[in-house]
Structure formats: C-alpha cells, structure tokens
Image (cartoon, grey):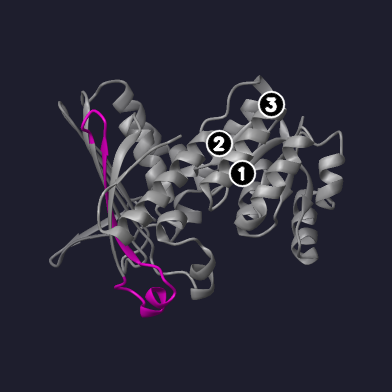
Amino acid sequence: MINIALLGCGRIGQVHARSLMGMEGARVAAVADAMPDAANVLAARTEAKVMEVEDILAAPDIDAVVIGTPTTTHYDLIHSAARAGKAIFCEKPIDLNAARIRDCLAVVEQHDVPFFIAFNRRFDPNFRTLKSQIDEGHIGKVEMVTILSRDPSPPPIGYIKTSGGLFRDMMIHDLDMARFLLGEDPVEIFAHGSCLVDPEIGQAGDVDTAMVSLRTGSGKLCQISNSRRATYGYDQRIEVHGEEGMLRADNVLTSTVEMSNASGFTRAPTEPFFLERYAAAYTAEMEHFVEVLTAGTTPNPSGIDGYKAQVMADAAQASLEAGTPQALVFD
C-alpha cells in the first residue's frame, strides 16, 4: 500500500483525495493545511491523520506527498520533501521563477526522488486519444496545432494580482499541451494580449484576452487562444492538422442529448468549469503517479516539463511587453 500525504486541503486537495479514495494500492495517510478546519474535514472524509508538514516529512511510513498548497510555498516544500526522500506530486506551477524551478529540479535530482508535475490535461481521455492517433500516424506529420481555452468568467481580482498573470497562470496548461502535441520544443513565441473583459484586470497589470503563436525548428506552427470570458461555458478545444488529415477534440457537454424542432438544433451546454471538465483527467494523473511509485517507472510529465512551460510563459509575457517575437531557449 502506497501511503500518500496531502499538503493542502483546499479545492485541489479535495480533488486528489477523491481520486485516491477510489483507488486500490494507495491511500491518503495524512493531511496538512494552514487552516485546521479544512484539514479536519478532509481527514474525517479520508480517515487520514491530521499532521504538521514537518511530521509528515519525518514519518518513515509516508511514501509520497501531494503539494496542493499556494504556489509561493512550493519551492520550500519541494526542497524539504526531496531531502526527506519523499516522492513528489506537485501542482503547477512549480514556481513563478524559472531559476527557482531549476533549483527545485536540482534538489530532486540530487536526492533521486520521483517528481511529477500535474499538467492534468495530458490525461484527459479525449486529448490522450488525439495524441495517440498522432503518434500512430493517422494524419501523417503534424503541421499546425490550434488550442482554444476560455474560462466562463474571470477569477477575483485578488487572485489575479498574485497569479503571475494570464500566461503563467492560465495559458501555461496550453503551452505544455502545445509541446505535448507538436512532439518537439518550439523555438519562437509571439504573444498578443488585451484587456477586454474586466478593466480591473488591466489595472492590476494583466490581460484577460490573449493569443500566442509558436514555431518549432522544423517549421510546425501552433496558435493558442485564451479568454477569461466565455458566455457559453468552459471552452476547451483542440485541432491538429497534418499532411494526411485532421484530428479534433471538441468540448465535453453536460449531456449527449440533442433536441431538434422547427427552431433548429439545440445541444446541451459545456461542462461548467475545470473540476467537472477534467474530472477523469485528475483521476488518471493520480493513477499514473501511483503506478510510478509501484513499478519504479519515470513520471511523465516530469519537472523538466514544468520548467519548459514556465520558460514559455515568461517569454510570452516578454513578447507581449516588447511587441516582438521572442526566442525560446531552454538552458
């Protein structure tokens, strides 16, 4: 039995707890949170112990930690967990600073602990099927990738001010997905952004509407579209065009029922937000992590994937500010 401790008992900690509760071969052994009430509620639900982080890291029977705490805490927790010999499942981003991410990867390598970065969209059943069909050659060589990702509404301004900005907070998922689908690292990025949804977002120094173009060394192209507003729900679509055809993954709807009448055709709305849309992906990524610990395999995506996505997000922000394309260098 793999004993896993949850560091952070908020929304994402509860998601991972549900995944583990339905899984054989692993369990939530302990939880920790700066808010005692949150820790006690999740502990009761999972039959886990409430412990201090230091005690979790010192416990010989804890095999791994899930870091679902605020981003500002990730750096120290990764260092402490690696030194304690614990396998690490870390929510994105590892850190908002690429140099500090390199520090994290160095300590993980030094202590030789498994490190998984939670880019959950790679585990979405539809996106994984699309990726498998690319790898199997169904559309020949990939030429263009289009990724659409739009939230139903913007988060609170307080969150915007500490998020690191749209590219580092929201688009980072899509930047990772671009690398995943293109099959090679982009060498150039060009970003455009505007504030069209909420003036307060602009006053906070961020954008709420953005488009990014990527180019790889072999000439493959990718376009990513992000918006903090979609009146019709949570918009998550991907299209991949190749030399022999096209693959497309459409939105997941709340129902497959379609009504037809004299007014036309009516379909159900999209899933309301990421927790519902990516429920299966969250379970699948945790299953992968447990399999890594059981079989001794390598986590995928790994810390280097988190680092490269951060470099791309930083370059997108630099491109927006400079108004020019930026070279992507993953040193």
Badge 2: residue crowd in 10 Å (few <14, some 14–19, many ≥20): many
Residue 220 appears left or right of 168: left
Q: Residue at x 37, y 59 (%)?
A: 234
Q: Earlier in the sequence, mark 2 or mark 1?
A: 1
Report whether residue 253 is seen. no
Q: Earlier in the sequence, mark 3 or mark 2?
A: 3
Residue 135 appears left or right of 85: left
Residue 123 in the image, given as x and y percentages of width and height: 47, 38
Q: Residue at x 22, y 34 (%)?
A: 220
**What's under tag 1, amino acid-wise?**
Cys
- The reply to whether the C-beta atoms of the residues labelled 2 and 1 are less than 8 Å apart is yes
Residue 90 in the image, given as x and y percentages of width and height: 61, 44
The magenta region covers: 195-220
Q: Please, is residue 288 above or below residue 235 in the view?
A: above
**What's under tag 2, amino acid-wise?**
Gly
Q: Nearer the viewer, residue 272 or 144?
A: 144
Residue 214 in the image, given as x and y percentages of width and height: 27, 43
Residue 112's disc number: 3
In the image, residue 102 lies in the stretch drawn in magenta: no
Q: CA distance from mark 2 to mark 1?
A: 9 Å
**What's under tag 3, amino acid-wise?**
Asp
Residue behind mark 1: 90
Specify the quadrant that holds the N terminus.
top right
Residue behind mark 2: 303
- The reply to whether the C-beta atoms of the residues labelled 3 and 2 are less than 8 Å apart is no
SS type, badge 1: strand
